[in-house]
Image (cartoon, rainbow, N blue to C red):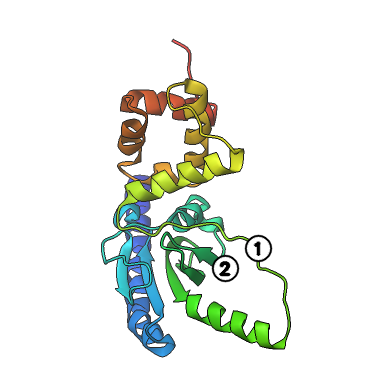
Amino acid sequence: MSESRRVQRTHQTGSDEAEALLRAVEPLVDGLAATFGPHCEVVLHDFRHPENSIRALSGSVTSRHVGGAMSEIGLGLMAQGDQAQDQLNYTTRIADGRTVKSSTIVLRTGAGQVVGALCVNLDITELRVAAASLTALVGSAPEPEATAITVFSDDIGDVIETVVAQEESLLGRVLPRDTRKGRLAIIGALDAKGVFNLPRAAQQVAAHFHVSRATVYADLNAVRGTETSA
């Protein structure tokens, strides 16, 4: 068997295994959501289609739909490739102010390839209100640390905008869109979080900066240290 055929067969075997794994996990989506009740959402992501990664969904905590995009958390995991690890019991705030406790479990083939993730999102806003009431009755407790806002959206453009806003928040200033230095800072942050793994990311980032896709690719090469001189 030629090397090209061997590689093609190996790829097909991996693809078949990934599909079988995702199909096997799909029934868990409805089952877990039903177990945890109306404040729970369970999402199955297929990393083979990052721009429309939501393969199955039950519940409506984040108001997304099948065929929607992953959040910046999912993008970050995908950027880690096969080194990605489960993210368990982390807390985020969504755009409307509600608090969500989540766990994201990566899905691997037998060869260790990360092909997707199963996410459980639990709206704990009312539970925290109840906990605060109980604390008021029995005694004081330390205030929880501020939790960053995570934007969940079917539109990957919203996720890109969120990553940009997060980078600006960390730096404590608005990054200038009209200078290359400002663009490079944002493009570096987007690249670190896996945004450029998405098919239309360069086009949307170009629109954000009002520049051409060629300019975005040149900036991306500069960030990655692969810029070539003319």
Residue at 49% x, 70% y is: 100
> Given the image, on which type of amino acid does mark 1 rest?
Glu
Residue 90, numbered circle: 2
Residue at 55% x, 67% y is: 91
Closer to the camera in the image, 47 or 215: 215
Q: Quadrant of the C terminus?
A: top left
Query: Would residue 20 be seen by someone viewing this image from the given angle?
Result: yes
Residue at 32% x, 73% y is: 57
Residue 145, numbered circle: 1
Give the farthest residue toward the front.
Answer: 137
> Given the image, on which type of amino acid does mark 2 rest?
Tyr
Tell whether 164 sits left or right of 66: right
Above or below, 110 against 158 in this view is below
Query: Would residue 1 be seen by someone viewing this image from the given angle?
Result: no
Label 1, label 2: how far apart the Cα atoms are = 13 Å
Task: Return the x and y of residue 55 as percentages of the image width and height.
Answer: 30, 67
Which corner quadrant of the image does residue 18 belong to? Answer: bottom left
Q: Are marks 1 and 2 in contact (CB under 8 Å)?
A: no
Task: Return the x and y of residue 6 as percentages of the image width and height.
Answer: 36, 52
Secondary structure under tag 2 reads strand
Q: Please rate how many residues cluster around mark 1, counting C-alpha atoms within 10 Å: few if below 14, some from 14 to 19, many from 20.
A: few
